[in-house]
Image (spheres, rainbow, N blue to C red):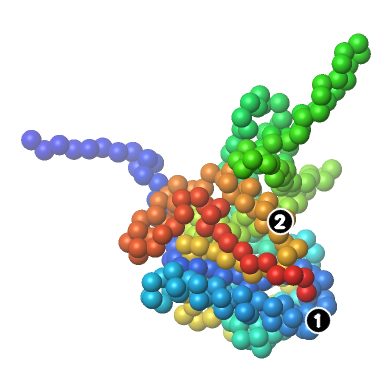
Amino acid sequence: MTEYTFRETTAEARTQSVPLSHLSLELGHLYMEDFEAGPARLRRHFERVRPYADAVHADTTAQAGGKRPRISTCFLIDDYFTRFSTPADVVPVLLAEAERAGLSIDYLARESGCAEADKVPLAQSVANRLVESPPPGSYGLRPPVAQSGWLANGERTPAVRGQAMKTAAAWQPPRETAARRHSVFMDVELWDDTKEGHRTWSCPLLAAVWQLARLGLLRNEGEAVFVPRARQTGELPREWNELAPLIQLTANAPAFSAYRTCSVLPSRFLPVEHAVRVILDQTDVHPGALRQVVERSAREHTKVPDSVADRVSYVFYAGL
């Protein structure tokens, strides 16, 4: 007797796969004032980055057991909070100074693309996947992150309200949920809204989107998003919105997304990147994308941490 198994097609959601390198190496993320300072500032940045980038390459090769690892490089331009100059003026100088320091940028991204790319609201979709970790002993007194726009890595200091004829409750310190003896408490602002209803996403949330994109873990209804486009020949556009969110600059470069990421950044980014870890630790990442990484890394005999936040690493150098 033949047995048949019936399944609803909606129960088998398709998850598009993306190519993966072993490491995505970020060669910088600078602000408007860094570009306004001119080529000399960019030159100093890449000169500082070069020895660390070499060290990361050497370490990744050693971890690969003698095999040649796939390492792609990227650079993020902040065009979200302040628009400055034009791609036609900025990008050639940026690439020239990187090359002068002996570095090659495979992929160039716009930070505004982390908010929305190809009409997909990436920042909002990540915000929708936040699952707060309730601190031990908490009673749900604080509003949810979707309402407050704030995400903490523990229990905030309780509000103290004195009432007539009653003794005010004693002050209590905040507590980190995963503290190791002493707490390092952080409360992260994810967005703010104007009276007109316009929302501005915070730098930590956009940076969390950037890390998830580099780890190949972003999907929209199962489809890959923030996909690199080949650089077009001819002059670059005069407006940032006319530049693709993510451009592949180097032909035949290793894949943009990778099992792990490493970012070489000025030390002023350390607080932001600490906040990124808080966000990643409480993000319900697309399960299909996670499963694909697990299966492919196993086939390649490449160890990938279970925690998404632990797949992200940094090298911070003293200011320019």
Labelled pair 1, 2 in contact (Cβ < 8 Å)? no
- Residue farthest left in this picture: 1
The image position of residue 20, as x and y in percent, is: 45, 66
Q: Which residue is mark 2?
A: 272
The image position of residue 269, as x and y in percent, is: 72, 62
Q: From the viewer's perspective, is 64 left or right of 242?
A: left
As rendered, which of 207 and 108 lies closer to the eye?
207
Q: From the viewer's perspective, is 162 left or right of 312?
A: right
Residue drawn at point x = 36 percent, y = 44 percent:
12
Q: Tag 2, which secondary structure?
A: helix
177 relative to 249, above or below: above
As rendered, which of 17 and 316 lies closer to the eye?
316
**Quadrant where the image shows the C terminus:** bottom right
Residue drawn at point x = 50 percent, y = 62 percent:
260
**Quadrant where the image shows the N terminus:** top left
Q: Which residue is mark 1?
A: 38
Q: The disc labelled 1 sits on which kind of residue?
A: Gly
As rendered, which of 30 and 232 lies closer to the eye?
30
